[in-house]
Amino acid sequence: MSESEEPRVGGEAAVTFPAGGSGGTGTGDGHGPHTATLPVARADDPHLREATRYPRRVEAIVGLSFLVGIAGICAFGGAYVERAGTQAYAATLFVGLFFLGFGLTAWGKYLMPRGPFVEERHSLESSPSEQRAMAAALVERTGIVVRRRKFLGGLLVTGLGLFGVVAAFPLLRSLGPRPRGSLFTTNWKKGSLLVDLNGKPVHRTDMQVGGILTVFPKGKETTLTAQAVDQTVLIRVQSETLVTMKARADWAPDGYVAYSKVCTHLGCPVGLYEQQLELLVCPCHQSMFNVRDGAFPVFGPAPRPLPQLPIYFDSTGFLRARSGYDQPIGPGFWERSTIGNGKASNT
Amino acid sequence: MALIERRPRTRREARRELGPYGRVQKAVNELDERIGIARGGRILLDKIFPDHWSFMLGEIALYSFIVLVATGIFLTLYYVPSQAIVVYHGVYKPLDGVRMSQAYESTVNLSFAVRAGLLMRQVHHWAADVFIGSIVVHMARIFFTGAFRKPRELNWTIGIILLILAILNGFIGYSLPDDLISGTGIRIGYSILLSIPFVGSYLAFFLFGGPYPGHIIIERFYILHVLILPLLIIGLIGAHLTLLVRQKHTQFPGKGRTEHNVVGSPLFPQFAAKTTGFMLMVTGVLGVLGGFAQINPIWQFGPYEPTKISYAVQPDWYMGFLDGALRIMPSWQWTAWGHTIPWEVFLPGVVFPGLVFNLCLAWPMIERRFTDDYVMHNLLDRPRDRPKRTAAGAAMIALLFTVFAASSTDVLANYFHVSLNEVLWFFRVVVIVVPIIVGVVTWRICIELQHVPGAVKRKRAMVVSRTPEGEYVAAPAPERPGDEHHELEPEPVPVRIELEPETVGASATTAPTGESGVRRVLR
């Protein structure tokens, strides 16, 4: 234990620990930011010995890794200049950085003073009187000010609060239009000509039984935003096996049947057609819809059938929509009413 | 100190005036006179970092984030956040003549036409996956050792918010290339927003600037991804580390370690060397992942088109738990009084992650409610000593893992040639049963482990010998010199190292640096 006056930073006099470092008790109270006495160690303090017993070996390993690392960094430069390709950049970069890092870590772990070293923990909390003083300052000062000028305080709070509300309008409201009816409608109208992605209309003779095509209302097939809501799968099935609901008797002429391609679960395109089972499958979460029976979901998380587009052949034999969809397409949302949410078909 | 100091006349005089520490002393003095760095700086150099591997997990997160920022800056120089449609005529011939958004075109270009561009993009993607992964593992370490207890609840909260922001920014960044798979992800995100009762359609329209897909979502995602969320993350990382320095590290119990100290290596030079080396190694590993492990080959997926989709689409791993939850949810939907609540989306897509993260945020409070533990804790628990907490954590991990696995129902059904229906019902059962089993088993294992005698001690060889009666007896072998491990009593970090005159001759590796008898032995 040393009771001599210990100097601050920069002082020339120094006090040594007893050799062997067993005098930890004598220094614990002398260290730390509060007392600012500075511990000094003798070079033969075992804490300052290297962590390894074989410093020569470790030095060799560290040296070797640094050399490999330098070679890797140089090779990276060379690879870059030579446009050697992604793999070459990555391999050389890895060799360079990893071995430099490995050497440095080994140096720090094995060739530096082993310690262990200790640091005292000082309570962060202030004295009770300081805590009280802080609370008092907050409460009493506010109290004095507000008690005398309650009305002014109220006005200020009202003003700032109103600003908060009003500021939210441009910040939020400008971001986009209100939904209004746009979730309920598509571009399909009475008489819309069914065309594919290239604008080609679909003739009575174009598709075989088992065929599938994605169609859009003519004129809207090119823009992404229109595609996203209008996309409709047109499938030709055996007309004899098609089960139709009473109200939909004339919606699927000659076995041509059209359903919205937007999944009623999360809006993915229902892009897989299982021809043998006549199921439309959504690849996202595996909802399956029975094509022969009103696209009712037979499996998976989709809660509703795909809405059906009523279609007919015009005088020239091309497919047209009888009307738009009779219900909103796609996933559910708060404003959606019950339309089209029936569970039974007339099988 | 005199107001005007006499300037030294000769070089030797100047050197003597600088003292034994030369120019470094001068630099320290100059800075200290102006902004006062000496005292605080020296204490910072002495900051003790506990020597335990599990404290390295957070470092992986930090260094992955640094790699993310560095590679991200590179990517912003080439990426164009625009949904304007262009026709591709670049170096990647299979896509020649294909209509695509500028975002997708610029991503393909920076992958193929910019030297080292593909490496940077893939390292960025890998670094994001590793970043979030290391946050999760780091968080598990904090949880199971009880490091979140008083006084560190605030830092736990900051950590959870960092995790949420990291996941959010990961998803948004994943969406930026505007390829077929990420575009489908955006569509699903839009539908999840729609499912929120009362405000869903408004939220979706305000975020997308109108009905899906609109023309502005990529630009908005871009500014969120490169500015707003990174700023929040950097700010919170700063707060996280500041609190860490101010409150000091926790530590495992051990020789000389108490609630009132920290034992380990000082920041300078040991920890600085180790952690800098570790940063280089993490960067190197991320580099090799980015170069050799292909990730998100968007040129194979094609540009986003709302009518197209690819089979077996899975999101990045950290969104897997959401995707799995959406898959195994039954198709429940309420419709009444002209309104719909799409529970089949709202429950797994909004309520489930909300519950998980809020449970994490509230855990310190919940645990305190049950244990009435209001004491400061700086020593860590061994997980086995807190069986209930450990069991709860293990059950949560089991739940998230099974839900995550459920995001591959279609792939599993294909791979094992079983029906999708069986896989689906398997997971619906498993997500409920497995967490319960894991919780109970973990609890039991903890209790058993508590009764293992001497579990903390080092293993010593046992000598099995046979007595003349035929009985076998095991006894610990005598300790060999190599077995003993002298752990010294910890000492404060020395500011100066002093040699006594007689030891100077003995130690050849040290060299005198001044007249005061101070020698450098720290390497």
Image (cartoon, coloured by chain):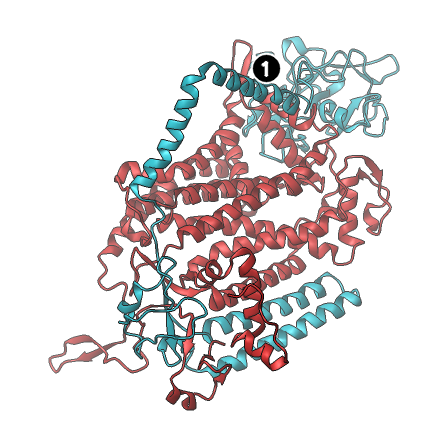
Q: Position of residue A301 (x, y in %)?
A: 54, 28
- Tell me the red chain: B
The quadrant holding residue B290 is bottom right
Q: Is residue B515 above or below residue B204?
A: below
Task: Tell me which chain the residue with mark 1 is part of.
Answer: A
* Residue in the foreground of this view, choosing between A243 and B98: B98
Kind of residue sitting beneath label 1: Glu
- Tell me the cyan chain: A
* Residue in the foreground of this view, choosing between B403 and B457: B457
Query: Residue at image x 55%, y 37%?
Result: B323
The quadrant holding residue B359 is top left
Query: Residue at image x 40%, y 18%?
Result: A147
- Residue on which disc 1 sits: A335
Q: Residue furthest right?
A: A316
Q: How many marks?
A: 1
| Neighbour tally class for label 1: few under 14, some 14-19, many 20 plus, Cα within 10 Å | many
Image side of residue A84 versus residue A60, left or right: right
Q: Position of residue A5 (x, y in %)?
A: 32, 69
Q: Position of residue B86 (x, y in %)?
A: 84, 38
Q: Name the element at disc 1.
A: loop
Q: Position of residue B418 (x, y in %)?
A: 52, 42
Q: Is residue A172 above or below residue A100?
A: above
Query: Residue at image x 52%, y 26%?
Result: B346
Q: Is any part of residue A73 visible from this angle? A: yes
Image side of residue B483 versus residue A218, left or right: left
